[in-house]
Amino acid sequence: MKYCKTCKIKVDAPLETCLICSDVLETIDQNPPANDFVEYVEKSNKFEVFFKGLLLLNIMAIVISLSVDFILNRQLSNWSLIVSVSNLYLILFVKLITSHMKFVIRLFWIVLLSILELIAIGYLTNDYYWALDIVMPLSLVFNTILLIIFTFSKRKRWQDYVMFLIISAVASMAAILFPFFDIAKTNWAYIVSFFFGMFTLIGLFIFSPKDMKEEFLRRFHI
Protein backbone atom coordinates (compact mmCIF):
# COMPACT_ATOMS: atom_id res chain seq x y z
CA MET A 1 0.00 0.00 0.00
CA LYS A 2 1.28 3.46 -0.92
CA TYR A 3 0.50 6.72 0.85
CA CYS A 4 0.69 10.38 -0.25
CA LYS A 5 1.66 12.74 2.56
CA THR A 6 0.51 15.79 0.61
CA CYS A 7 -2.99 14.61 -0.32
CA LYS A 8 -3.41 12.37 2.79
CA ILE A 9 -4.68 9.47 0.70
CA LYS A 10 -3.78 5.80 0.34
CA VAL A 11 -3.05 4.40 -3.11
CA ASP A 12 -3.50 0.70 -3.77
CA ALA A 13 -1.68 0.62 -7.11
CA PRO A 14 1.89 0.05 -8.35
CA LEU A 15 2.67 3.77 -8.67
CA GLU A 16 5.74 5.75 -7.62
CA THR A 17 4.15 9.20 -7.65
CA CYS A 18 0.73 10.56 -6.73
CA LEU A 19 -1.63 11.11 -9.66
CA ILE A 20 -3.04 14.25 -8.03
CA CYS A 21 -0.01 16.20 -6.78
CA SER A 22 2.89 14.21 -8.34
CA ASP A 23 4.61 13.85 -4.97
CA VAL A 24 6.59 10.65 -4.30
CA LEU A 25 4.45 7.99 -2.63
CA GLU A 26 5.58 6.26 0.54
CA THR A 27 5.17 2.56 1.27
CA ILE A 28 3.12 2.00 4.43
CA ASP A 29 2.11 -0.98 6.52
CA GLN A 30 -1.48 -1.97 5.86
CA ASN A 31 -1.87 -3.08 9.46
CA PRO A 32 -0.18 -0.38 11.57
CA PRO A 33 0.31 -1.12 15.27
CA ALA A 34 -2.21 0.23 17.76
CA ASN A 35 -1.53 3.57 19.45
CA ASP A 36 0.72 4.66 16.60
CA PHE A 37 0.67 8.33 17.60
CA VAL A 38 2.68 10.99 15.78
CA GLU A 39 5.08 12.79 18.07
CA TYR A 40 4.15 16.43 18.49
CA VAL A 41 6.97 18.80 17.73
CA GLU A 42 6.48 22.44 18.55
CA LYS A 43 7.42 24.65 15.64
CA SER A 44 9.98 27.31 16.29
CA ASN A 45 8.96 30.85 15.44
CA LYS A 46 12.49 32.30 15.69
CA PHE A 47 12.83 32.71 11.96
CA GLU A 48 9.39 34.29 11.67
CA VAL A 49 10.44 36.90 14.22
CA PHE A 50 13.73 37.41 12.35
CA PHE A 51 11.97 37.84 8.99
CA LYS A 52 9.48 40.32 10.42
CA GLY A 53 12.36 42.31 11.90
CA LEU A 54 14.18 42.22 8.56
CA LEU A 55 10.99 43.30 6.79
CA LEU A 56 10.55 46.24 9.18
CA LEU A 57 14.18 47.38 8.79
CA ASN A 58 14.01 47.24 5.00
CA ILE A 59 10.73 49.14 4.89
CA MET A 60 12.26 51.76 7.20
CA ALA A 61 15.32 52.02 4.92
CA ILE A 62 13.09 52.50 1.87
CA VAL A 63 10.88 55.14 3.50
CA ILE A 64 13.80 57.05 5.06
CA SER A 65 15.92 57.09 1.89
CA LEU A 66 13.02 58.24 -0.28
CA SER A 67 11.94 60.86 2.26
CA VAL A 68 15.42 62.31 2.83
CA ASP A 69 16.13 62.38 -0.89
CA PHE A 70 12.86 64.16 -1.65
CA ILE A 71 13.26 66.67 1.20
CA LEU A 72 16.82 67.59 0.19
CA ASN A 73 16.43 67.53 -3.58
CA ARG A 74 12.70 68.15 -4.03
CA GLN A 75 12.70 65.09 -6.24
CA LEU A 76 13.72 61.45 -6.14
CA SER A 77 17.24 60.80 -7.36
CA ASN A 78 18.69 57.50 -8.52
CA TRP A 79 20.47 56.67 -5.27
CA SER A 80 17.26 56.48 -3.22
CA LEU A 81 15.56 54.42 -5.92
CA ILE A 82 18.53 52.04 -6.02
CA VAL A 83 18.35 51.69 -2.23
CA SER A 84 14.63 50.93 -2.50
CA VAL A 85 15.10 48.35 -5.25
CA SER A 86 17.94 46.68 -3.32
CA ASN A 87 15.86 46.47 -0.14
CA LEU A 88 12.90 45.00 -1.99
CA TYR A 89 15.23 42.48 -3.60
CA LEU A 90 16.64 41.49 -0.20
CA ILE A 91 13.15 40.93 1.22
CA LEU A 92 12.07 38.74 -1.70
CA PHE A 93 15.41 36.92 -1.78
CA VAL A 94 15.23 35.93 1.90
CA LYS A 95 11.59 34.92 1.49
CA LEU A 96 12.46 32.67 -1.45
CA ILE A 97 15.61 31.15 0.04
CA THR A 98 13.74 30.16 3.19
CA SER A 99 10.50 29.03 1.57
CA HIS A 100 9.29 25.43 1.59
CA MET A 101 9.52 25.16 -2.17
CA LYS A 102 11.91 22.61 -3.62
CA PHE A 103 15.48 23.81 -4.05
CA VAL A 104 15.49 23.88 -7.84
CA ILE A 105 12.21 25.84 -7.93
CA ARG A 106 13.59 28.35 -5.44
CA LEU A 107 16.71 28.66 -7.58
CA PHE A 108 14.58 29.24 -10.68
CA TRP A 109 12.77 32.20 -9.11
CA ILE A 110 15.94 33.57 -7.48
CA VAL A 111 17.70 33.72 -10.86
CA LEU A 112 14.75 35.50 -12.48
CA LEU A 113 14.48 37.89 -9.53
CA SER A 114 18.21 38.66 -9.75
CA ILE A 115 17.90 39.40 -13.48
CA LEU A 116 15.09 41.89 -12.84
CA GLU A 117 17.03 43.53 -10.00
CA LEU A 118 20.16 43.98 -12.14
CA ILE A 119 18.14 45.41 -15.01
CA ALA A 120 16.39 47.84 -12.63
CA ILE A 121 19.70 49.03 -11.17
CA GLY A 122 21.22 49.33 -14.62
CA TYR A 123 18.25 51.39 -15.79
CA LEU A 124 18.48 53.70 -12.77
CA THR A 125 22.22 54.25 -13.38
CA ASN A 126 21.60 54.85 -17.11
CA ASP A 127 23.90 51.93 -17.89
CA TYR A 128 21.52 49.03 -18.27
CA TYR A 129 22.88 47.58 -21.51
CA TRP A 130 25.43 45.41 -19.68
CA ALA A 131 22.55 43.85 -17.72
CA LEU A 132 20.32 43.42 -20.77
CA ASP A 133 23.07 42.44 -23.22
CA ILE A 134 25.08 39.99 -21.10
CA VAL A 135 23.57 39.20 -17.70
CA MET A 136 20.00 38.38 -18.74
CA PRO A 137 20.61 35.97 -21.68
CA LEU A 138 23.50 34.14 -19.99
CA SER A 139 21.52 33.89 -16.73
CA LEU A 140 18.68 32.25 -18.64
CA VAL A 141 21.16 29.78 -20.13
CA PHE A 142 22.62 29.09 -16.68
CA ASN A 143 19.14 28.58 -15.24
CA THR A 144 18.26 26.16 -18.02
CA ILE A 145 21.46 24.15 -17.47
CA LEU A 146 20.68 23.73 -13.77
CA LEU A 147 17.13 22.61 -14.54
CA ILE A 148 18.42 20.07 -17.08
CA ILE A 149 20.73 18.61 -14.45
CA PHE A 150 17.97 18.35 -11.85
CA THR A 151 15.37 16.97 -14.28
CA PHE A 152 17.51 14.10 -15.53
CA SER A 153 19.39 13.38 -12.32
CA LYS A 154 16.18 13.00 -10.30
CA ARG A 155 14.11 10.89 -12.67
CA LYS A 156 11.50 9.91 -10.09
CA ARG A 157 10.65 13.56 -9.43
CA TRP A 158 10.95 14.86 -12.98
CA GLN A 159 7.40 16.23 -12.82
CA ASP A 160 8.59 18.80 -10.27
CA TYR A 161 11.17 20.26 -12.63
CA VAL A 162 10.25 19.62 -16.26
CA MET A 163 7.67 22.41 -16.48
CA PHE A 164 10.17 24.95 -15.13
CA LEU A 165 12.73 23.57 -17.60
CA ILE A 166 10.35 24.15 -20.51
CA ILE A 167 9.53 27.67 -19.27
CA SER A 168 13.23 28.50 -18.93
CA ALA A 169 14.01 27.12 -22.40
CA VAL A 170 11.15 29.06 -24.00
CA ALA A 171 12.25 32.23 -22.16
CA SER A 172 15.79 31.71 -23.47
CA MET A 173 14.42 31.56 -27.00
CA ALA A 174 12.01 34.47 -26.55
CA ALA A 175 14.86 36.69 -25.34
CA ILE A 176 15.98 36.99 -28.98
CA LEU A 177 13.22 39.61 -29.33
CA PHE A 178 15.31 42.10 -27.31
CA PRO A 179 17.97 42.68 -30.02
CA PHE A 180 15.32 42.25 -32.71
CA PHE A 181 13.50 45.33 -31.38
CA ASP A 182 16.80 47.16 -30.63
CA ILE A 183 16.23 46.93 -26.87
CA ALA A 184 19.61 45.19 -26.52
CA LYS A 185 22.73 45.98 -28.52
CA THR A 186 24.84 42.81 -28.12
CA ASN A 187 23.59 40.01 -30.36
CA TRP A 188 25.95 37.11 -29.63
CA ALA A 189 24.67 36.43 -26.10
CA TYR A 190 21.06 36.34 -27.30
CA ILE A 191 21.97 34.06 -30.21
CA VAL A 192 23.59 31.66 -27.73
CA SER A 193 20.52 31.88 -25.51
CA PHE A 194 18.13 31.26 -28.41
CA PHE A 195 19.89 28.20 -29.79
CA PHE A 196 20.51 26.74 -26.35
CA GLY A 197 16.81 27.05 -25.51
CA MET A 198 15.80 25.54 -28.86
CA PHE A 199 18.22 22.60 -28.59
CA THR A 200 17.09 22.03 -25.00
CA LEU A 201 13.49 21.56 -26.14
CA ILE A 202 14.59 19.31 -28.99
CA GLY A 203 16.86 17.30 -26.70
CA LEU A 204 14.09 17.02 -24.11
CA PHE A 205 11.84 15.45 -26.72
CA ILE A 206 14.54 13.10 -28.09
CA PHE A 207 16.18 11.90 -24.87
CA SER A 208 13.17 11.77 -22.57
CA PRO A 209 12.17 8.21 -21.62
CA LYS A 210 8.98 6.89 -23.15
CA ASP A 211 7.05 6.95 -19.87
CA MET A 212 8.08 10.58 -19.33
CA LYS A 213 6.79 11.54 -22.79
CA GLU A 214 3.50 9.70 -22.26
CA GLU A 215 2.97 11.28 -18.86
CA PHE A 216 3.76 14.74 -20.26
CA LEU A 217 1.29 14.27 -23.14
CA ARG A 218 -1.38 13.12 -20.68
CA ARG A 219 -0.85 16.19 -18.53
CA PHE A 220 -1.54 18.44 -21.52
CA HIS A 221 -4.36 16.20 -22.82
CA ILE A 222 -2.56 15.68 -26.13
Image (tube, rainbow, N blue to C red):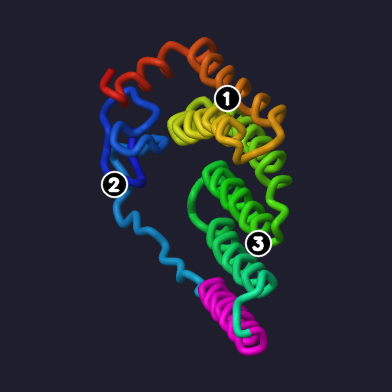
Decide which of 199, 102 is in the foreground and name it: 199
Q: Is residue 130 magenta?
A: no
Residue 76 placement, left or right of 186: left
Q: In this view, does 5 lie above or below 185?
A: below
- The residue pinned by badge 2 equals 8
The amino acid sitting under disc 1 is Gly
* Relative vertical location of residue 185 with respect to residue 41 in this rendering, above or below: above
Q: Based on the displayed image, in which of its 4 quarters is residue 150 positioned?
A: top right
Mark 1 and mark 2: span between their CA atoms?
Answer: 38 Å
State which mark lies toward you, 3 or 1. 3
Q: Main secondary structure of the magenta part?
A: helix
Rendered image quadrant of residue 203: top right
Q: In which quarter of the image is the N terminus?
A: top left
Which residue position is annotated with label 3? 124
Query: Are dots 1 and 2 in contact, CB under 8 Å?
Result: no
In terms of sequence position, does the residue under pointer 1 or pointer 2 come before the other? Answer: 2
Report, in whole angstroms, how far the alpha carbon at label 3 lies from the one at label 1: 30 Å
| Residue depicted at x 61% and y 46% | 111
120 and 1: which is toward the camera: 120
Binning the other alpha carbons within 10 Å of mark 3 as few (below 14), some (14 to 19) or many (20 upward) gives some
Q: What residue type is labelled 3?
A: Leu
Going 67% across and 25% down the picture, which residue do you hit?
192
Q: Residue furthest bottom?
A: 71
Q: How far apart in space, not on screen, are marks 2 and 3 (Cα)?
A: 49 Å
Q: What stretch is highlighted in magenta?
A: 47-73
